[in-house]
Image (tube, rainbow, N blue to C red):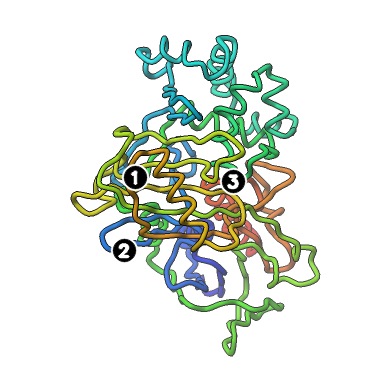
């Protein structure tokens, strides 16, 4: 195929778009502003510590992930289904009784919510697993917090479990995210596992880029503007027959209603410790409005290789803008020392200003014709569907199909 196809962005959606274009005989060019692939899916290795930019996990039942990724080659390290809830005066472990019946009795009498709450959790899991993903996204969309209340959950289990757990996923504390997304994520947790590759989350885009055989990637090329047939990046210009914008089009597509873009922000603080205070592959939740940290995890409980021998690596997640990470980091360190009982040393801080797109009408699929924004210009990215790795892959596949269909 001799048509010139350019993809802006070597994130997940851009890489999948390139994979699909290659299957159709194209040899695309990817322009990437960063020095490596991945977009928001990044890992920094420093002094033997593997630090993902943001607390990111792969949900193994994502349909697109199962299609494009080799889980065995990623050497996935798995979380135990559940969480540890660190209240003011008590720590409670909640495990999934459907997978661990030994945890059923302790969960029923844990004090996190009522007996009715716990039965409703099991009922909800049964409900979402009986629905297809498309059926979930056809459900009425209300705020997740309103969905939980209408389902009959008590304020106690909402504040102690649902709020901290799903705030860490949605990256917003009020659970205003669509109930469609909540049910989709709940389904993925109920049916699969949460995992991280042994080499960090960036192993995922790394594996996708390794699949490319006829695609050229130009790094450190920041696109300034898109015009008919031409992409401008500083003093460079690139001609195209078809263009896929695999990043949010704000600032590079003028006059098409895409200038406005809202994102949720998150900052991830990493600390080293001599040992873990949890000792299990579980996430820790910190409910309460007076807490700085939403959730934390000793990454070395998931996989010891995330830190040098003799050290443990703690990841702590703070949702929302942080004005001064240097002074804020000290407050986070003190809070985590109080919670874990461990002496901590900062080893890394990563702020992701555009971590997840804010989306009003969440979907799981669009037609290829809907990916076309104007003649020869197509969009890809999770902002078109829902904020997830699965949606990023879906949108990349759809954009490539739209390009191929337009050339027939």
- How many numbered circles are shown? 3
Name the residue carrying label 3. Answer: 171
- How many residues crowd around disc 2 within 10 Å: few (fewer than 14), some, or many (20 or more)? few
| Of pointers 2 and 1, the one earlier in the residue sequence | 2
| Of pointers 2 and 3, the one earlier in the residue sequence | 2
Q: Is residue 225 above or below residue 53?
A: below
Name the residue carrying label 2. Answer: 46
- How many residues crowd around disc 3 within 10 Å: few (fewer than 14), some, or many (20 or more)? many
Does any portion of residue 249 appear in the rendered image? yes
Q: Is residue 159 above or below residue 373?
A: above
At 56% from the left edge and 72% from the top edge, which residue is drawn? 6
Q: Which mark is residue 299?
A: 1
Taking the image as shown, residue 106 lies to the left or right of residue 26, namely left
Taking the image as shown, residue 291 lies to the left or right of residue 254, namely left
Circles 2 and 3, Cβ within 8 Å, touching? The answer is no
Q: Estimate the spatial distance between the alpha carbons at disc 2 and disc 3, rounded to whole Å.
A: 26 Å
Q: Secondary structure at mark 1?
A: helix
Q: Estimate the spatial distance between the alpha carbons at disc 1 and disc 3, rounded to whole Å.
A: 19 Å
Residue 16: x and y in percent read 49, 56
Q: Estimate the spatial distance between the alpha carbons at disc 2 and disc 1, rounded to whole Å.
A: 15 Å
Q: Secondary structure at mark 3?
A: loop
């Amino acid at each position: 195929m001799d048509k010139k196809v350019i993809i802006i962005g070597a994130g997940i959606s851009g890489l999948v778009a390139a994979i699909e274009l290659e299957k159709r005989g194209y040899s695309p060019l990817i322009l990437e502003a960063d020095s490596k692939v991945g977009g928001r899916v990044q890992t920094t290795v420093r002094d033997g510590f593997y630090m993902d930019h943001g607390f990111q996990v792969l949900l193994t039942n994502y349909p697109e992930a199962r299609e494009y990724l080799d889980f065995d080659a990623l050497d996935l390290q798995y979380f135990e289904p559940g969480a540890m809830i660190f209240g003011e005066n008590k720590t409670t472990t909640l495990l999934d009784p459907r997978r661990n019946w030994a945890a059923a009795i302790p969960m029923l009498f844990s004090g996190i919510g009522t007996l009715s709450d716990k039965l409703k959790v099991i009922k909800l899991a049964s409900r979402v697993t009986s629905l297809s993903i498309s059926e979930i996204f056809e459900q009425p969309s209300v705020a997740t917090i309103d969905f939980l209340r209408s389902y009959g959950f008590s304020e106690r289990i909402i504040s102690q479990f649902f709020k901290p757990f799903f705030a860490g996923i949605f990256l917003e504390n009020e659970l205003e995210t669509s109930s469609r997304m909540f049910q989709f994520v709940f389904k993925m947790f109920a049916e699969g596992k949460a995992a991280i590759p042994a080499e960090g989350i960036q192993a995922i885009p790394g594996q996708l880029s390794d699949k490319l055989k006829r695609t050229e990637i130009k790094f450190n090329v920041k696109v300034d503007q898109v015009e008919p047939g031409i992409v401008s990046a500083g003093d460079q210009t690139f001609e195209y027959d078809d263009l896929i914008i695999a990043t949010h089009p704000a600032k590079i597509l003028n006059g098409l209603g895409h200038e406005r873009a809202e994102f949720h922000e998150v900052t991830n603080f990493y600390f080293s410790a001599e040992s873990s205070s949890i000792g299990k592959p579980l996430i820790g939740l910190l409910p309460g409005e007076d807490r700085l940290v939403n959730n934390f995890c000793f990454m070395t409980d998931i996989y010891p290789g995330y830190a040098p021998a003799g050290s443990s690596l703690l990841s702590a997640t703070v949702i929302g803008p942080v004005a001064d990470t240097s002074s804020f980091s000290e407050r986070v360190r003190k809070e985590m020392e109080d919670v874990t009982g461990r002496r901590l040393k900062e080893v890394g801080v990563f702020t992701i200003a555009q971590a997840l797109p804010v989306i009003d009408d969440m979907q799981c699929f669009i037609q290829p014709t809907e990916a076309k924004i104007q003649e020869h210009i197509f969009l890809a990215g999770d902002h078109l569907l829902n904020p997830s790795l699965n949606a990023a892959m879906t949108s990349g596949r759809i954009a490539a199909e739209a390009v191929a269909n337009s050339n027939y």
